[in-house]
Amino acid sequence: EAQVTQNPRYLITVTGKKLTVTCSQNMNHEYMSWYRQDPGLGLRQIYYSMNVEVTDKGDVPEGYKVSRKEKRNFPLILESPSPNQTSLYFCASNRANTGELFFGEGSRLTVL
Amino acid sequence: AQSVTQLGSHVSVSEGALVLLRCNYSSSVPPYLFWYVQYPNQGLQLLLKYTSAATLVKGINGFEAEFKKSETSFHLTKPSAHMSDAAEYFCAVSEPPNYGGSQGNLIFGKGTKLSVKP
């Protein structure tokens, strides 16, 4: 089954404790991206990647890092989480030249 | 720069009534336009997309949208609402690849939550 898998789905952590949200897709898509969803703000892109070792900032990259060492994986790293990073995070992937994003089920992160 | 405005953060309709969710876009190049739906506790899934072919686009679950360049609009409609349509709907815009668009770099609107009353 074609899917984008994110882990963990739910996480409560404390300020400053590094964490990684993993994302994996099994569709051999070139593009992968991370979004955060906040009430009243819709989805905002954090980072995106057009292929292995090619990443670029989205609209709200501050406080986040990503890496794309393999085509299928695109982890999101919060080196020193802060409460304003409490949000619902979505990973997505798509084939080049299409805008049809395939989304994971989301990771709800709470930073205390 | 591109942007999307969705008019109305909440829309409520009765079952069987017309659904109309409004989306206006701003783009300096001919856009690609999308509607995504998010059911509770789930990720987003594509409803339909406009990529410069037919201006009236049909999607899943009986939804359709019409691209109107003169009005810079891409409103989503469904003739008869069903209880299962209750969800949040997002309009999104991107630049086409031949205009140098970063595929996958969609700009989303803030969403419209649709409620359907029995």
Image (cartoon, coloured by chain):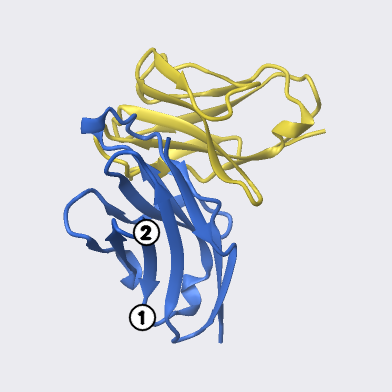
Which of the marked residues, 1 or 2, is nearer the chain's N terminus? 2
Which residue is rendered at x = 25% and y = 31% of the image? B99
- Could you tell me which secondary element the residue under label 1 belongs to? loop
The amino acid type of the residue labelled 2 equals Ser
Q: Can residue B84 be seen in this view?
A: yes
Q: Residue at x 28, y 34 (%)?
A: A95
Labels 1, 2: front one: 2
Residue B94: where, in percent of width, then height?
35, 40
Q: Chain B is drawn in which colour?
A: blue
Judging from the image, what secondary structure is the residue with disc 2 in?
Answer: strand
Q: The numbered mark 2 sits on a residue in which chain?
A: B
Residue B50 image point, x, y percent: 27, 53
> Which of B44/A43 is in front?
A43
User: In this picture, is A69 found above or below A28?
Assistant: above
Q: Say which mark, if any, is on residue B79.
A: 1
The subunit carrying tag 1 is B
Q: In which quarter of the image is the N terminus of chain B?
A: top left
In front of the other: A73 or B97: B97
Q: Colour of chain A?
A: yellow
Q: Which residue is drawn at 36% across and 80% down?
A: B79
Give the amino acid type for the residue marked by disc 1 in the picture.
Pro
Give me the disc on residue B73.
2
Q: Quadrant of residue A108?
A: top right
Q: In this view, does B69 lie above or below A72?
A: below
**Quadrant of the rendered structure where residue B63 is?**
bottom left
**Residue A3 located left or right of residue A18:** left
Q: Are marks 1 and 2 in contact (CB under 8 Å)?
A: no
Q: How far apart are marks 1 and 2 (CA)?
A: 18 Å
Q: Position of residue B21 (x, y in %)?
A: 46, 67
Q: Which residue is drawn at 30% across and 27% down?
A: A30
Residue at the left extreme? B53
Residue A27 percent location from the top left of the image: 30, 35
